[in-house]
Image (spheres, coloured by chain):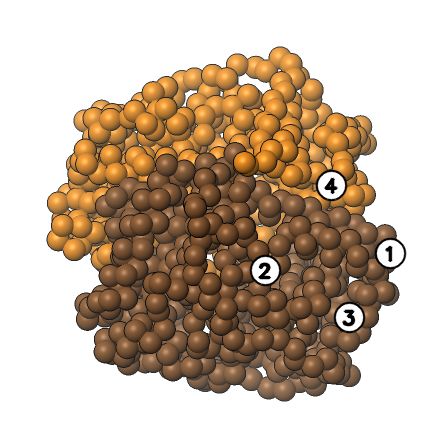
Amino acid sequence: MNRTTHTEGAELRPFAERVTERRVGPCRLLALPTPAQSVVTWRGSFMSFPEFDSDEDLLQHMVVSLLDKGTRRLDRFAVAELLENRGAQVDFSSDGLYVDLSGRALKEDVPDVLGLVAEQLRDPLFDEEEFEKARARIAASIQRSMENTGSQASGSLTRHLYTRTHPNYTPEPAERLERLESIELPDVRAYHERHFGSNAFTLAVVGDIDEDEIVEAVASHFAGWSEHEAPAHYTSKADRSRAGRSVVPIPDRQNVDVRMGHPVAFRRTDPDYIPAYLATYVLGGNFSARLMQTIRDEMGLTYGIGAGLYGVSAEYSGHWQVAVTLSGENVDRGIEETMRQVRLFVDEGVTNEELSDKKTTVVGSFQVGLATTSGLASSLLKNAERGFDVGYLDRFPDEVEAVTREFANAVIARHLEPDDLHIAMAGTVEAPMDAAASP
Amino acid sequence: MEVPSGFTFQEESGGIASYRLDANDMDVLLLQEAAAPVVTFMVTYRVGSRNESLGLTGATHFLEHLMFKGTERFNKRTGTSVFNVLQRVGAQVNATTWLDRTNYFELLPKEHLPLAIEVEADRMRGALIEERDVESERTVILNELDRGENDATRNLYHALWSAAFVAHPYHHPTIGWRSDVEHVTPEGLRHFYDTYYWPDNATLSIIGDVDGAEALGLVREHFSGIRRPAGSVPVVHTREPIQRGERRVTVRQSGQLGAVMIGFKSPPGLSPDTDALDVLSVILSAGKSSRLFRSLTDRGLTTNLFGGASRFRDPGLVYVFAMLAPNRQHEEVEEAIYAVLEDVRRDGISHEELQRAKNQRKAQEAFGRDGPFAVASQLNEAIAAGDWRLYTTIRDRIERVTREDVRRVARTYLIEDARTVGFYIPVQETVE
C-alpha cells in the first residue's frame, strides 16, 4: 500500500544478529535499532547491594528519590527544564539488589539526556531541604499504602515467607515510618558513596538510534565511573514457610484482597523455572486459565484471580502465589473454592491440551510484548541481568516448546504443596479463629 | 493500492487511511506499520455511559462483560470461548468502557488477525446474553465495584463529576450505580445491545504489520453479512445547564492522607478551546517545571498532583487533583491552587512555557506511535470524542495555540461560578 509510514515486512532476523553488544567503558551496552520513527527508549541497571536487615533498601529508595533534585552543577529546576524542554523523561527506581534507570527521548536529544543521567547518578546534589521534602513524600506514600488492601495483603504474605535479609521481605509500614524518621542526610550521602557504582552496569537502548552517537555519549559521560566495594549481603533462599492465616484489618474496605503463597526453591536460571511458569500459567496465568474460568466465570465470586511466580530472580528464589479479590460476604467461600482448585491442580497436574495451549499463549505473548521500544528494552535488560546471552531471546520459544507434560507435572509435584500455603488478607474482614497478628 | 471491492475510500490523514464498508456503512481505519510482526485489531462502538438512562446505569459496562460470555459460534460449552480461542494464539485480548465509547481489542501475532476479525464480527450481533450468565456476572461486577470503592481518591473523582453534572449523563460513573447493577435484567441489557451494537455505530482499527488489501478483504468477508439496523441510534439530547455558582462535595472515608480535586466546566473535546486548555494543563501540572508542581509539591504542600483537560464528546471538565502532604490542610492547598490559576488569568504565560508545553506534547505524540496498541488506543479516544482525525491532527492543533489563546481560555473557563471543589477527608477508624 502507498502509505508513508509503511515499512517492508517486520524484521524477523534473530535478536542475536540484530542486537549489538559491546563494552563501552564501565558499561555493557546493548543497542537495537527499530523502525520506531524518532523515538528512543532505554532501560538500565547496576547492582548496589543494600543490606536489607539494616533497612538500607529504604536508604537506597531515598537516594533514588533525590536523583532528580539537582546535581552539583544543575539545580532541580534546571534538571527538570533540560528534560521537559525536550519532552524527554528519565526515571530512577530501587529494585532489590539493583538500581534501575529508564528513559525516553527524541532521537536528536539522546546524547544530552544520557549525559544528564550520568551526572544525576554520579554527582547528585543531596540538598538538605530537598532531603526533608523527599522524606515527607516517602512517608506519605507509605501512609497511602496503608489504605491499599492489595499492597497490605502482599506485604503481609512476604513477612510470613521471608526473613528480613531477603530482598523480597516487605517491612511493616509503621516500622518503616519509624525508620524513615531516623535517617539523616549524611546517611544518604554515605549510602550513595558506598553503593553507587558501575557494578554489572548494563544499558539497553532501542529505537531510532544512531549507534555511534550513543556509544560516544556513554563513553564520555560514564568514563571513569568505577565499581563500588559494598559486598553482597542478602539471603537468597525463601525458606520460612508458615502455613496459616493472617489478617491486616483496614476499616471501610468492603473488597478484601487475599494472597496465598509459599516459597519455591528454584531461581530464574534453574531448569525447573520454565516448566513451573508454564504450569502455573495453566492454573492462573490469564482469563482462560482454570482459576478465572471457575472462580470468576462459573461461580461469579471475584472480579480478579490469578496465580504466578513472584520475586524469583537469577540471584535468589521467591514464592508461588495465588491472588484473589473477594467482597466481604464471599471471603470464606472464595478461599475454599480457590483452595479446591489449587489442590486439584497439584493432585492431577496439567493436561496435554492445557500445556499445549499455554505454550502458544506464552510464546505469542512474548512476541507481542516485543512490539514497542520499551518492551524490547526491558526484555534485553532483564535477559542480561539474568546472565543470559542475547540469543536466549531467540531460544526462549524453543525452551517453552520443549517442556513435556511429564516434566511439568513432576515440577508441580516437586515444588507445590497446598498445605504449606500461607493465606494473607487485607480489608474489612472478621479475623478467623486461627488468625495470627500480621508480623 | 486499489480500493478493494466492497469499500469506499474516505480519506487519509497522518498515514491512516479510512474506508467505509458499503454493505453496512461500517468505518475501517488502516495503518500499516511493520516495526514488529504483530497487529492490533480494535472495534470501537460509539456507546458509553453517556447513552444510559436512570435504571440502566452501568449497562455499557455490564454488556461489555457479557460480550465475553459467548455466541453460538464461540462459547465455553464447546471450548471455544473468546478468551480461549484468542489467548491460545498469544493474543492480548480485553475490552474497556468509558463515557462515550466501548472498545474490544486484540493485540496478536500478525498471522492470527483473521481469527480476531472473525470473533469480533461474530459477536457484533451474535451475543447470547443468557440469564444465567447475567446472574454470575452480576456478582463479578459487584466485586469490581467494591474494589473501586476501596479507593477513596476514586470515590472523590466520581463524587466531583456527579456534583458538576446534574442533568447530563456524565453525572454517573461508567460502572453504574450499585442499585442499577443489582437490578438490571437480561431483557434490559439485550435491548441496550440491540440499540447500539450495529456496524454503522462502530469503527474498526487495524494497526500493524498487515497487508492492507488482505486485511480489508477479511473485514469484508466477515462483516459484510451484517445488515444495517432498522432504526438509528438514539441521540442524546440532554445538555448540562449552565452552572451558576460554585459547588462543593466532601468524601469522608477511613484513610491516612487527604486529597483535593478542583474541576471547571470545559468545552467538548473537538473544540479549539480544548487545545488551549490542553496546553494550559501541561503548563500547570505536567512535570517538575510546571507551575503547580513548583508552587505546591516543591513547597511541600502536596506529595504529587496531576491535571488535565478532558476530551469527551460533550462538555467536560478541566481539573487539578492534588494529594496532600502529611500535616497539610485542604484549605491551604485549595488556596494555593487558586493563586496559581489567578496568575495565569491575570498575566498569561511566558513564551518559554508555551514552547516547553508544545515540545512536551510533540514528544508525547511521537511516543504515542510506539507500537500498534498505543496508536489504536489513541484512535479509540479520538473516535469517542467524535472524529478519529483528532489523533492525526493533534500536533498541528497544539502548534496553533498562542499565548493569547491560553490566557483567554484561562479567563473564560477557570471561573468560580463554573467550579466544583472536592475534598477527600480521611477518617481515623479502627477495626475491632
Residue A170's label in the rendered image is 2
Colour of the chain lettered B: orange
Asked if labels 2 and 1 touch by Cβ distance under 8 angstroms, the answer is no
Q: Nearer the viewer, residue B152 or A416?
A: A416
Residue placed at 28% from the left, 61% from the top? A343
Q: Name the residue under label 4.
A: B326
Q: Mark 1 points at which residue?
A: A128
Q: Determine the CA span between mark 4 and mark 3.
A: 27 Å
Nearest to the eye among marks 4 and 3: give it: 4
Q: What residue type is labelled 4?
A: Pro
Mark 3 vs 2, N-terminal side:
2
Chain at numbered mark 1:
A
Q: Determine the CA span between mark 3 and mark 2.
A: 22 Å
Residue B212 seen anywhere in this rendered image of the structure: no
Q: Determine the CA span between mark 1 and mark 2.
A: 28 Å
Quadrant in which residue A279 is drawn: bottom left
Nearest to the eye among marks 1 and 4: give it: 4
Label 2 element class: loop
Nearest to the eye among marks 1 and 2: give it: 2
Quadrant in which residue B99 is drawn: top left
Residue A192's label in the rendered image is 3
Residue placed at 28% from the left, 26% from the top? B184
Q: Which amino acid does label 1 sit on?
A: Glu
Mark 1 vs 2, N-terminal side:
1
Q: What residue type is labelled 2?
A: Thr
Nearest to the eye among marks 2 and 4: give it: 2
Q: In this view, does B239 lie above or below A197?
A: above
Image location (x, y in percent) of residue A147: 58, 42
Nearest to the eye among marks 3 and 2: give it: 2
Residue placed at 58% from the left, 31% from the top? B253
Q: Give the class, few, some or many, for how many residues have Cα within 10 Å of label 1's Cα (few <14, many ≥20).
A: few
Q: What residue type is labelled 3?
A: His
